[in-house]
Image (tube, rainbow, N blue to C red):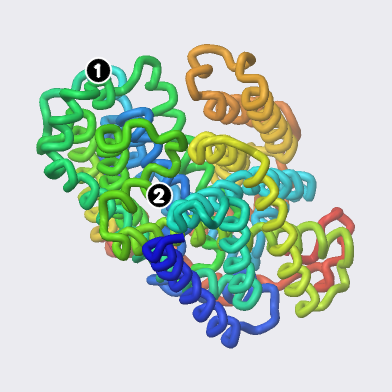
Amino acid sequence: MVIWTLLLVGLAAMEFPGVFFFKDRATPEIFGLPFIYGYNLLWWAYMCAVMLYAYLVHWGRPATAEGGAR
Amino acid sequence: MTASDTGAVLIIALFMLIPLAMGAVAGRKSIPTTEDFFVQGRGMGSVAVFFTVAATWWSSFAFLGSNASFYLQGPLFWTALAWNILFGLLYYVVGKRVWFLGKRWNFITPKDFFTNRYGSVAVGNLVAVIMLVFTLPYLQIQLSGGAYLIEVASGGLIPFAWAALIFYVVIIIYVWSGGLRAVAWTDIFYGVLLFFGMVVAGLLVANELGGTVAMFDQLAEARPENLVLADGAWMTWIAMFLVTPIGAFMGPQLWTRMYAVKSGRLFDLMPFLLGLAAVSYFGSMLVGNSGVLLEPDVAEPDKILPIMLYKYAPYVLASFLVACGAAAAMSTANSQIHSMSSVYTLDFHKTYINPRMSERQLVWVGRWTILVLSAIAYVMALYVPGLLVTVGLVALAGTAQVIVPTAGALFWRRSTAAGALAGLLVGVGTLVLFTFVPAATPPPFDAGGGGLLSLILNLVVFVVVSLTTTPRDETLLTRHDEDRALFDAEDFDAVAEPARPTGPADGTRLADGTTGRDVR
């Protein structure tokens, strides 16, 4: 549930604020890129980190009989 | 043709011969059964799965169309970072379940899934028709993309029509010989080329303007409007984010890549791998934006990448990168042709024309189907105009309609065949209407959101009709519950030996109107 919340937050952040609130802003630049490019690139990195974490903690797999992650 | 043009064409030709050789080797390993030809005996390993999914997912739409979009529309295509992640998540959430059911019930085509889950041949047939009809234009843009590259590389001496023909002959030969095994092997080769090709091409071109930061500084001076989204672009941005990955994911070529996977564990890693691979769009972004400054008056924006490469890079390197673009088109086209062939052969030819065909005969029908479908796409490439991204989005919006009954079958017990049929008909019908009569699209969807609106209408009709019609048969619901319990427990050993048919193995019809392959 925590992982899915993190993922949904990331997807929403990539799709909505940039296009609704900052769509006509090229500044501030991020890593020398116009705002929307840099902004989405940062969220992309965040999403990759969450998905790697999800894989490493065996997301989606049922708990073992002892109650821990399998 | 100059010496440089000849050299460029030879380099591209070399990259076309390598997959031919791989196809020949794959052909020797194949056995003449439909399961081997169409889903590689469900034994595709991890490396092959990642590269064949990624290479199939990245197409001319991504390699060429993205450059044109950045060139014409500024950051609009940057929503691709998010849709790549959504594609990966779909592969994990939906794909793993489809894989599990495919292995358990021995599915080969998407129709098998729908007939088995809804107990309705009509739903399966409608899905198969939608997939065939809407994959054709997507196949067409791969052909157009590949032909653009050869045309530019040859300095215009190989015209578009001949370039497209050469392109397709190569694909037909190796898909014909090796089936899915040949496609997957060549996709490993293509996938690596693609990833590095997109990134290197971008860095190379941006370097002409002093690097990424300097290029954007110059763009801010010369064309500041290219650094921000245009008014009203929000609808296209969101529609592309949803329709593109869902449409690509629901294409028959991706269904094949769900069924063929050997181990379910790979699905857990795919979102990360596919998400990470989205960094390659950084290259397209650099090419498109650099093009605004370096080549502001290109008449056919889909050609911006090869035009700039041949102008600003050494021709050997440019030809290598153009070959990467050809790889993008080929790796998607080969998969589409192959999967469309399986849909026609198994879902229509075997079911309605000759149910008593042997396995060997079916493989031959599949091969001839490859030839015919390719010919149709070739004719479409010659006579149906449009930007790669524009044609691609219509095709993707069509296959995206299939996500609604797919999700219903997997996650909603109350979904019904009537709901699935009604939803699909409304979704596809409105999509056709919005495509051919754009004025019929109501605001705010008229700003590039017609495909998204048709998908929403499909969903609404699906839910309403499902709730007002008789629930699925108890046998189907029991099967649904048992399968779900096995999946939730990750009892993948239960699918080590697929359930055997309870119906006639030759495909003749059972009392419920389905075939032995349809319902187990």
Chain holding disc 1: A
Q: Which residue of the protein is positioned furthest toward the bottom in this rendering?
A: B28
**Residue A36 placement (x, y as % from top left):** 23, 29
Quarter of image, res B112: bottom right
Under circle 1, the secondary element is loop
Judge whether residue B281 can be spotted in this image: yes
- Tell me the amino acid under the disc marked 2: Phe
Instruction: Specify the farthest residue to the front.
Output: B2
Please tell me whether residue B93 is drawn above or below residue B49 in the rendered image: above
* Residue B373 left/right relative to B78: right
Quadrant housing residue B372: bottom right
Nearer mark to the viewer, of 1 and 2: 2
**Disc 2 target residue:** B63
x, y (%) of residue B12?
A: 44, 66
Q: Which residue is mark 1?
A: A24
Badge 1 density bin: few <14, some 14–19, many ≥20, Cα 10 Å: some
Tell me what residue is drawn at x 65 percent, y 84 percent.
B31
Distance Cα–Cα, label 1 vs label 2: 27 Å
* Amino acid type, label 1: Asp
Instruction: Please give the name of the residue rendered at 47% of the width and 69% of the height, measured from the top-left corner.
Output: B13
